[in-house]
């Protein structure tokens, strides 16, 4: 089972109310390469991955939920004091008419999250290559958001998340090597 | 944002720092399970983590529930602040 802990993985601070940055950030909440996709992808693939990699998928999948909570906290803090005028100026009035300031799993363009964003192939190499690609895409997305953001406090949290994508990608690459070694062993008669 | 004493942030940050070490070592050990030195480091920080959790909870209430933390009376698990409120 999972146990919730009343703690963010890394402190989240924002300098000012800025609903436009929240509009960008929601990409990492309910977008194809976002944290929800990541958590659900790994925690679903783990049931059929070889035993040597189950622990890694479980632990990275769990960490993704901590990242999802950090993104939610960023979006919440960036929008909670926004006036309807600021909402309109930021271009998130489409979200507001449906959800007020409630969070929702959609991407920066308003497309709702769908399971079609993720895949489980049952083939360990195919699954792990998808995972490596997902981490690299998420890293790139964080970089594009940092490029658009002028909030130094927010960027501190975003840089942490960007670095985690790199670490996860590297761990998945190691997992591929471990499986390749295993496969190689079986071929010795 | 909720008003919490400076110590809340100080102890929380210490926990976050130790937890970062533990998360990193966990993922590393998942793919390097025979690294004795890393396992020693892991157990050292696991102990430090327990100490900090106890310190935090004695002042600010349970961090986990379902019995992973003791409860105050009245029940204080669902007291604010939640992490996004500070």
Image (spheres, rainbow, N blue to C red):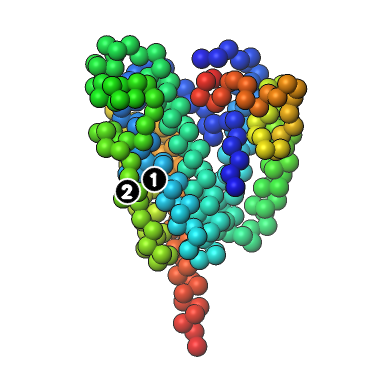
**B6 displayed left or right of A188:** right
Q: Which residue is mark 1?
A: A37
Question: Chain letter of disc 1?
Answer: A
- For mark 2, name the chain: A
Q: Secondary structure at mark 2?
A: helix
Q: Position of residue A14 (x, y in %)?
A: 43, 20
The x and y percentages for residue A73 are 46, 27
Q: Residue at x 51, y 24 (%)?
A: B84
Which residue sits at x=60%, y=47%?
A1
- As displayed, is residue A180 above or below residue B77? below
Residue at screen point 47% across, 42% down: A64
Residue B21 position by quadrant = top right
Image position, residue B23 (x, y; %): 57, 44
- For residue A143, say whether it is visible: no
Asked if both marks, 1 and 2, belong to the same chain, the answer given is yes
List the residue tagged with mark 2.
A117
């Amino acid at each position: 089972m999972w146990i919730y802990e009343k703690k963010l993985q890394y402190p989240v601070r924002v300098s000012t109310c800025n609903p436009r940055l929240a509009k960008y950030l929601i990409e990492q909440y309910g977008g194809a390469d976002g944290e929800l996709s990541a958590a659900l992808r790994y925690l679903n693939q783990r049931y059929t991955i070889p035993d040597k990699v189950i622990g890694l998928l479980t632990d990275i999948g769990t960490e993704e939920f901590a990242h999802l909570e950090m993104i939610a906290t960023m979006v919440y803090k960036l929008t909670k004091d926004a006036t309807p005028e600021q909402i309109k100026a930021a271009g998130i009035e489409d979200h507001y008419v449906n959800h007020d300031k409630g969070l929702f799993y959609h991407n920066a363009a308003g497309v709702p999250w769908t399971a079609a964003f993720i895949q489980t192939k049952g083939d360990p190499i195919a699954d792990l290559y998808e995972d490596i690609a997902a981490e690299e895409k998420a890293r790139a997305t964080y970089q594009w958001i940092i490029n658009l953001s002028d909030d130094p406090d927010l960027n501190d949290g975003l840089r942490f998340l960007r670095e985690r994508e790199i670490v996860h990608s590297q761990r998945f690459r190691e997992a591929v090597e471990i499986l390749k070694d295993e496969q190689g062993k079986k071929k010795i008669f | 944002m909720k008003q919490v004493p400076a110590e809340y942030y100080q102890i929380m940050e210490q926990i976050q720092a130790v937890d970062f070490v533990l998360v990193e070592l966990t993922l590393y050990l998942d793919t390097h399970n025979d690294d004795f030195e890393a396992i020693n480091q892991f157990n050292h920080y696991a102990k430090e983590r327990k100490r900090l959790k106890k310190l935090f909870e004695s002042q600010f209430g349970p961090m986990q529930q379902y019995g992973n933390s003791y409860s105050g009376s009245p029940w204080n698990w669902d007291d604010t602040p939640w992490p996004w409120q500070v």
